[in-house]
Amino acid sequence: MAKLAAEQHGAENIIVVVGFTSAFTLSEGRIGHIIVETFLNGDPAEAGPLAGVTLGIKTYSIFEFENEIPTEIWKECSMHRKKREIGAENLEKFIAVLKKLRGE
């Protein structure tokens, strides 16, 4: 689906927003890195349908948009609790990886 969207609309017009539900997912930094790498440069395992397919789609964490999302929706989705569970340090590290991969 990401490949089709990139082809139809151009990667520069698309972003991927990822959300993580546990500190484990983020603390296993490689998992997040693989997701981001897949949308940018194709499947790093060279095994899936995106093997060797460079999409160039930038990836963001949902937590980077916290100030853009109305507070009532943020709370309704329990994102404030997820953020606490994940921990500020894990989240900061993951966002730093995303920014580096995006070239920021």
Image (tube, grey):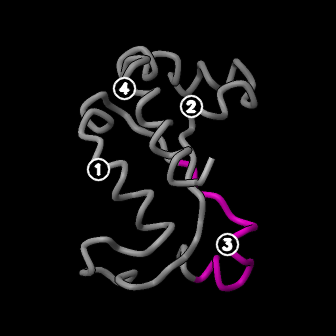
Q: Residue at x 43, y 17 (%)?
A: 88
Q: Is residue 101 left or right of residue 29?
A: right
Of marks 2 and 1, which one's residue comes earlier in the chain?
Answer: 1
Identified at 50% across, 54% down, the residue is: 101
Element under disc 3: helix
From the image, tell me which residue sits under label 2. Answer: 63
Q: What whole-number distance in Å separates the C-alpha atoms at marks 3 and 4? A: 28 Å
Q: Which residues are magenta?
A: 4-17
Amino acid on which disc 3 is placed: Ala
In the picture, measured across the screen, residue 46 lies left or right of residue 60, that is left
> Which dot marks residue 11?
3
Going from the N terminus, do you reach mark 1 or mark 4 first? 1
Marker disc for residue 31:
1
Q: Nearer the viewer, mark 2 or mark 4?
A: 4
Reading the image, the residue beneath label 4 is 90
CA distance for labels 1 and 4: 13 Å
Q: Residues within 10 Å of mark 2 (few under 14, many from 20)?
A: many
